[in-house]
Amino acid sequence: MFAFALWDRKERKLYLARDRFGEKPLYYGGLQNGFVFGSELKALAVHPQWRGDIDRDALALFMRFNHVPAPRTIYQGIKKLLPAHYVVISNQGRTVSDPICYWSLEDVARQGIARREGSAAELTDELDHLLRDAVGLRMLSDVPLGAFLSGGYDSTMIVAQMQAQSSQPVRTFSIGNEQTDLDEARHAAAVTKHLGTDHTELYVSAHDALSLIPRLPHIYDEPFADSSQIPTFLVSQLARRNVTVALSGDGGDELFAGYNRHFVGVKLWANLNKLPLAFRKALSAGMASLDALGFAQLMAFIARQTDIPGLNLKLAKLRSALSARDGVEFYDLLKAHWKSSSVVLGASNFSGYGGARLEGVEFLDQMLLMDMQTYLPDDILTKVDRASMAVSLEARVPFLDHRLVEFAWGVPTEFKVRNGQGKFLLREVLHRYVPRELMERPKQGFGIPVAQWLRGPLRDWGEALLDSKRLHQEGYFNVDKVRSSWERHLSGRGHEEHNLWCALMFQAWLESQSVGKSNA
């Protein structure tokens, strides 16, 4: 992982480069009489020519995806360098090249898909060997080392490989939640007992979240609304009390199809794509015209007619995705929060996924590529990097060893998803280290009960940020849309927490900018 700037004194050119997957950030852009770059936006903001005008199209994308996707930032004229790219700056900062790709994930995907072969046993052995080496390389350290452990497959796999190569108990760290259906700490504790790690856990309360929220805008530099940013920071803070480097299990879901949407999405699109586009558009419009009660009744009926577990909780997202023209647009809409740019005043119609399209491949492959090109760098890795760096902890991600990534694209899809579960091959490797009965449970994720907290201990904070008068004065949001979402959520008539967290994180960030300017 790296982001670097290299000055060629002879040619008088500046090179800016970023690692293959975007583990480390790099921002750059031109000002009136110069050029700025850095690993934090706040570093650029101290330049005397800094203007900091908000890009409303970037804000609309943020409201859609809960992060500002590269190459945009929340500021006009400032960009994020794309992963696996570099730019060349010359002519005293007046000439900036287009980003140049030095390692192509698209090419890796195409080449891997074309060469797929091997038995489950052979691939399991190879994955075990690659993981052992990738983890071993990232254990090299002259400072105290540990690992995050949620109790899920990915982090458990990393810890198991660490413990297999360590003569001492590995230090592991977990965050628990007082709400048991979101709590994975008890699963982590069972894993640590089996592996023999030196384990530390901390249970998170609403008070912990509330006390952290004012710091989030400073930590993340621009609006960022993945609510697991809170436990990610808290587990980083917990780990930093004892270690300086921590290994993370991030990347496993994107490589081996671990998100529920990977298998649900394939099944949904296979069925929806049988229907004419005109019919799907009409159905979407009809669903949009229903009141809250009618929509809820329709969702319950559709859910009863399917064999997809928990589908009724996802069908609200499906409404806008019905009118998708192809699988790429369908998956893009399925992941989206606010579906329309009209929630942001003055924004253009925002475009969705701008990455590579793989023709003639299974839909699952396209979904995985989309996640690796967008969601992984702009959400997952951003979350981990900013949270860990805020407490001076170095987070390392063994799953993103490029050899592992290249291997994963060569794994046939039947060794990724099998019997309605993802990560088949990864599970086969892990069961060599951890008994199957300790791991076989539904995926829970690394989250907090945002929905309940917004109706409870965070309600006053949310009401202040989403006050109608305040929203009108600031002039960024369609007040009626935001207030309606807030009121539906408070009344229990809708599941609006993800949409609202986007709006609240922007409002909190905007407030921090005003405070910063007044203190300057």
Image (cartoon, rainbow, N blue to C red):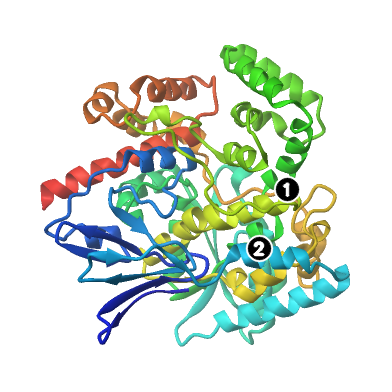
* Number of the label disc, if any, that sits on residue 203: none
Q: Amino acid at mark 1?
A: Phe
Could one spot residue 511 in this view of the protein?
yes
Q: Is residue 111 above or below residue 453?
A: below
At x 35%, y 51%, the residue is 73
Q: Nearer the viewer, mark 1 or mark 2?
A: 1
For this rendering, which residue is in front, 129 or 57? 57
At x 71%, y 20%, the residue is 279
Q: Amino acid at mark 2?
A: Asp
Q: Does the CB distance between marks 1 and 2 fall below 8 Å?
A: no
Name the spot of residue 254 as percent of width and height, x first.
64, 57
Q: Earlier in the sequence, mark 1 or mark 2?
A: 2
Name the spot of residue 377 as percent of width and height, x first.
50, 59
For this rendering, which residue is in front, 491 or 20? 20
At x 67%, y 19%, the residue is 283
Could one spot residue 452 in this view of the protein?
no
Q: Viewed as shown, does residue 19 lie left or right of 325? A: left
Q: Viewed as shown, does residue 512 lie left or right of 125? A: left
Secondary structure beneath label 2: helix
Number of numbered discs:
2
Name the spot of residue 458 as percent of width and height, x first.
39, 35
Q: CA distance from mark 1 to mark 2?
A: 23 Å
Name the spot of residue 503 as percent of width and height, x first.
39, 35
In which quadrant of the rendered view does residue 474 lie?
top left
Q: Viewed as shown, does residue 370 lie left or right of 506? A: right
Secondary structure beneath label 1: helix
* Number of the label disc, if any, that sits on residue 363: 1
Q: Is residue 122 above or below residue 114?
A: below
Q: Residues within 10 Å of mark 2 (few under 14, many from 20)?
A: many
Mark 2 — residue? 154
For this rendering, which residue is in front, 70 or 135? 70
